[in-house]
Image (tube, helix red, strand yellow):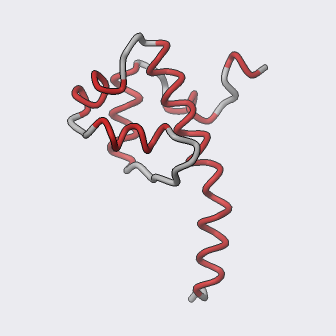
């Protein structure tokens, strides 16, 4: 069993992955020509929640179900959300 501090450190280490994921979601959403409101409507979530997912200042963790739905709606393979963005190379 992990201590409270060990759990916190694991969560903190994973935080960067969620920040990167949110940046990728925003990138692919904009590339698809969708506003946050339009994508949120398609996904059936609130725009403010999508905003939190995309914000690098937030540590929001989407479910796998939502992640795969975003991937399908944006027509981007899931693996692309974990690769460097084309503009960052």
**Total of numbered circles in the picture?**
0
Q: Residue furthest right?
A: 89
Residue 41 x/y as whole percent: 22, 28
Q: Is residue 51 above or below residue 80?
A: below
Please name the residue shown 45% across and 53% down the image. 61
Q: Position of residue 49 (x, y in %)?
A: 34, 44
Q: Is residue 6 left or right of residue 30?
A: right
Looking at the image, which residue is at 37% across and 31% down?
70
Q: Is residue 85 above or below residue 47?
A: above
Judge from the rendering whether residue 9 lies leftward or rightward of residue 77; answer left or right.
Answer: right
Tell whether 74 sits left or right of 43: right
Residue 32: quadrant of the picture: top left
The x, y position of residue 19, in whole percent, is 59, 45
Q: Quadrant of the C terminus?
A: top right
**Residue 5 image-quadrant placement:** bottom right
Q: Residue at x 36, y 26 (%)?
A: 36
Q: Residue at x 33, y 41 (%)?
A: 48
Residue 34 % position (x, y): 37, 16
Location of residue 79 (image quadrant): top right
């Amino acid at each position: 069993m992990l201590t409270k501090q060990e759990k916190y450190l694991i969560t903190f280490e994973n935080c960067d992955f969620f920040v990167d994921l949110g940046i990728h979601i925003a990138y692919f959403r904009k590339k698809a020509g969708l506003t946050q409101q339009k994508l949120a409507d398609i996904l059936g979530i609130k725009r403010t929640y999508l905003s939190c997912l995309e914000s690098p200042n937030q540590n929001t963790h989407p479910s796998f179900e939502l992640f795969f739905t975003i991937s399908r709606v944006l027509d981007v393979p899931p693996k692309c959300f974990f690769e460097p963005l084309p503009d960052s190379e």
